[in-house]
Amino acid sequence: MTTEPVMSRDAVAAYLDEVFPQIHHGGPGPVVAAVGPMSAVLRLPYHDRHVRPGGTLSGPAMMMLADVAFYVALLVQLGPVPLAVTTSLSFNFLRKPARRDLLGEARIMKLGRRLAVGEVLIRSDGSDDLVCHATGTYAIPAPEKNAVS
Amino acid sequence: MTTEPVMSRDAVAAYLDEVFPQIHHGGPGPVVAAVGPMSAVLRLPYHDRHVRPGGTLSGPAMMMLADVAFYVALLVQLGPVPLAVTTSLSFNFLRKPARRDLLGEARIMKLGRRLAVGEVLIRSDGSDDLVCHATGTYAIPAPEKNAVS
Amino acid sequence: MTTEPVMSRDAVAAYLDEVFPQIHHGGPGPVVAAVGPMSAVLRLPYHDRHVRPGGTLSGPAMMMLADVAFYVALLVQLGPVPLAVTTSLSFNFLRKPARRDLLGEARIMKLGRRLAVGEVLIRSDGSDDLVCHATGTYAIPAPEKNAVS
Amino acid sequence: MTTEPVMSRDAVAAYLDEVFPQIHHGGPGPVVAAVGPMSAVLRLPYHDRHVRPGGTLSGPAMMMLADVAFYVALLVQLGPVPLAVTTSLSFNFLRKPARRDLLGEARIMKLGRRLAVGEVLIRSDGSDDLVCHATGTYAIPAPEKNAVS
């Protein structure tokens, strides 16, 4: 298993906008802030549609950010794999996020032939405290036939 | 612990629209289809913003549906508890959902004084197969001071 | 995908004792109580080694029961698959179990070519209340080469 | 929230052996290797009872190690809290562990008044690769009445 990235930040950002234009529906969606070996950082710009009572941001906004961040970390490592499939995601919500941008840092913990496992750490912009911790698994399509499950 | 519901379908639907108008941002959000003891069924109308490559629906759409369904099941049982907080959510994605409405059925497995645990079963409208299974935990505010964590 | 079981209770019990003699180390381990389509029920006999302060049973005893119950449900469906690998397990602990036998009921929610997903419901013998709810995923070896991940 | 530890390695090791003598039933159980602010490292000595077909170690052995490691990290931070209760544990099994000691490193990600959330990283002794990643939540008894949920 090589851990050398195969897509740059710009390449993966362009690919993401091409295949997932819907993530920007209704307001700005997550943008690729940085990529590295087995990792990616995405920023979700603050937007009113994510606000919940009490002035915090919604759980689904954090979950969407985690899902996209993990996917981008895989793209960076594997190149465009449009059929990779999220098989599980688990979230612990630790603190109420402030009304600011969210940053999601995805790290791949294992990149196997068929299965990838990673975590995503979500923080409010400007703070070191975690607001959410996620772990997830992805099924990687078999090269020969792209059949999953 | 009583398991008698305290809010009707209409009452909980009205409350949800009042406190979470954002769930309909950008297109129709989940609507309360039915409620029962320790349970609720929500319908997420099909909408283009949820579509992903391959003609399936997005993981975040299912996660948002599960989060809201679980919250509604708690409202039904506890009455309006605006400060109840999701502390964890875990998802297994089982099959790719078709391009139709999604139905999320939340069931509370334990309703303690401080913690509620439940599951949400998500299916495509018209099918018995699960597309997603979720489990979640909620912190219930202490009555005397509403302080959580 | 057929859902017809391929191993009987007696056959799977004999196989389990043959390949996993260690589950009875230090005291009686889980025994197969019943099997059905996509399901299995295992009983963990009460034993002092599982007791924890306060007179309850240990979390690891429940986790071991869930792991074995899920594996048996797969054996029942797939036949002997010695290399099937647990890829994830998630537990919510709902109530303190009494000092009695535990019953773990595993249900397969999805049986794909490469991945199985299921849940396990754990109760104290003689009670309907769940003491623990588990979900898990298993990687199923590819028939041609038995290589996982 | 202070992050200053209140129990030393020796103190927490002695307490653990006093309240959980059962963890050494049938062979050596986990021992406290090191403690630090919001963290603890436990070692599970290699023993035949943990071996599984293929020469690897059992999932339940890793799950027990994670459960104890997380509990020790809380003891270190909170002092003896015999009634703290594990409310959830989630595991991703990443690689097959070798036939050696396992090391479990627990880190508390959030220590609230009522709920603690942490992760445990499990490795084979002598290797940097993770064999298992766990996240967990603990309910912390209310000081005034020690009643949980």
Image (cartoon, coloured by chain):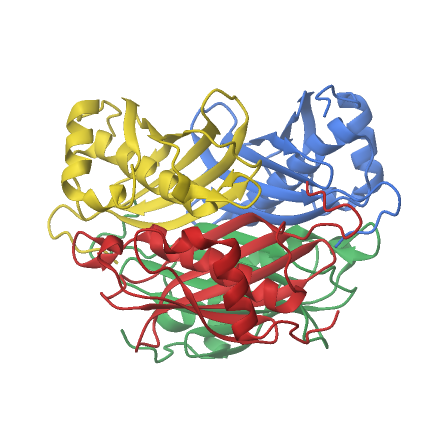
Chain colours: A red, B yellow, C blue, D green
Q: Residue at x 70, y 37 (%)?
A: C71
Residue C58 visible within the image: no
* Lateral position of residue C86 relative to residue D53, left or right: left
Q: Nearer the viewer, residue A136 or C50?
A: A136
Q: Residue at x 52, y 21 (%)?
A: B128
Q: Nearer the viewer, residue A98 or B137?
A: A98
On the image, the x and y values in percent for residue A117 come to 61, 59
Quarter of the C terminus of chain C within the rendering: bottom right
* Lateral position of residue A119 relative to residue B136, left or right: right
Residue at the extreme left: B144
Quarter of the N terminus of chain C within the rendering: top right
On the image, the x and y values in percent for residue A109 come to 61, 66
Q: Nearer the viewer, residue D14 or D146?
A: D146
Q: Residue at x 66, y 69 (%)?
A: D123
On the image, the x and y values in percent for residue D117 come to 40, 61
On the image, the x and y values in percent for residue B130 come to 52, 30
* Lateral position of residue A145 relative to residue D92, left or right: right
Quick check: D4 above or below D30?
Answer: below
